Image: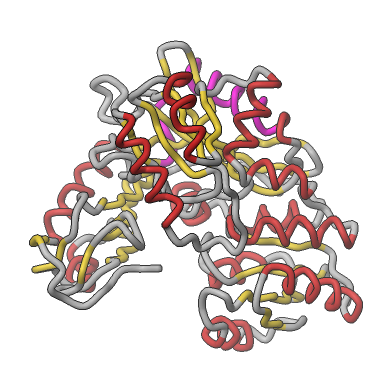
Amino acid sequence: MGAPHVLLLAGIGGHATGEALDSLSTLTDAVSVVYVTAWRPAEPVRADWERRRLRGEFVEVADLDAAVLAAVALHGRLPLDGVVTYSELLLRPQAEIAFRLGLPGNPPEAVAIAQSKALQRLLFAERDVPSPEFEIITSERDLAAAAARVGLPGVFKPSLGTGSQSVRLVSTYAELIHAFTAARAEKTTFLQSDEAYLLEQRMALERDGDSGYAAYCSVESLLAGGTAHHLAVSDRLPLEHGYAEEGVVLPGRLDEATRAAAVDVADRAIRAIGLVSGAVHTEIALTADGPRVIEVNARAGGPLPTMFKVAAGYDYAAEIGRAALGLQPSGLPEFTRVVLLRYLPIPAGNWRVATQTPAGAVLRGYPELVHLSPHFAPGQRVSRQRTLHLASFMVAAPDRGTARSVTRQVERALGIRLIPGFDATAGGRP
């Protein structure tokens, strides 16, 4: 093949596969797909790939190990020049494929650390990267010592996980026991396991004074050939429902000194882990003692590729593809609009959707809406078992004030009304 041959690993999560193919197609017409069917059937994605008439192959596999073997076999037929994924759940096979084939990518051991909050905490403590106090819990025998060492209230979380699932503020020892028991019983979408959990020092993330934002942000970075390009710092909306995320604003509103300090801490964390290629999404707590790392993710935050495109005309997904080919970025983002992604959290408890305005009607009423995605329909059951949010939508505006104002209007227009109880059909996204 004359053009570079890129492999996309897909199957669940991250940037939508169709949009990913759009972006990768700007780099080359040779894009193969290895699709892991453990979560969802491949047929719709295969049909989309075939419609594009891309050169390469579409291969279906059952699990992560099979994805690695399929990529190695594909390389024997049609040599690969890069391997890309936008999914947290597919980072391990991506790293293993790149390592086996000598392609640009993160070392597997660095990805293992990036996917383990426990390993991150141990590493950051060793390398003096600012992060909260913590204790690792692997059995019930560790609970008492963890509570004594960290103190309560504290934050309990799984070492392996995404989307703040099973992350809880625990104020008493009884709550800690319950959180640990419930978390071990939770089903995970990962096709791998981590028996470790964490009790961490509580950081007051809910609000940053009277700023109207939460006291944490995230640094969005692109690594190419070991060079870190820190593209933006995004804000978070105040937390009103525990640790269920409420919203992301790009670009952020932090002053230059605070922004520089957050970027510096993120850079130190990335280097400590040993990440060298692709997107990195680093969440940073803004504390009175300075920025501290909440966690480092070796991929783009779920909505960030779309947000970059809307706010700056910047194809972040394509730039991630360039990094996978060993190329430096073609440019850096220049923001012309503000984009706000709003998540509507599910209140604690069991509910049923009584009323909700059809998405089409809301979209027609607000031209500022980039997209709207209800997660439930009227009559369906609602709880935090499968997702933390009722709906999500994205607004683009010339400034933050307008974006916040339109967001409030859209929330009212959605008209989601919940009533207690589970006397309905199950719903929600897996």
Point out residue 237 in the picture as x, y percentages from the top left corner: 31, 37
Residue found 49% across the figure and 29% down from its top = 284
Point out residue 340 in the picture as x, y percentages from the top left corner: 34, 46
Point out residue 314 in the picture as x, y percentages from the top left corner: 56, 51
Question: The N terminus is located in which quarter?
Answer: bottom right
Q: Please identify the dominant SS of the magenta region.
A: helix
- Residue 187 figure quarter: bottom left
Q: Nearer the viewer, residue 408 or 387?
A: 387
Q: In the visual, does 345 lie left or right of 225?
A: left
Q: Nearer the viewer, residue 196 or 220?
A: 196
Q: Nearer the viewer, residue 234 or 367?
A: 234
When the figure is inspected, residue 41 is found, relative to residue 328, above or below; the finding is: below
- Residue 178 figure quarter: top left
Q: Which residues are magenta?
A: 250-270
When the figure is inspected, residue 426 is found, relative to residue 403, above or below; the finding is: below
Residue found 61% across the figure and 22% down from its top = 264
Farthest residue to the top: give it: 289
Magenta stretch: includes residue 406: no
- Is any atom of residue 414 visible in this view? yes
Q: How many marks?
A: 0
Residue found 89% across the figure and 73% down from its top = 79
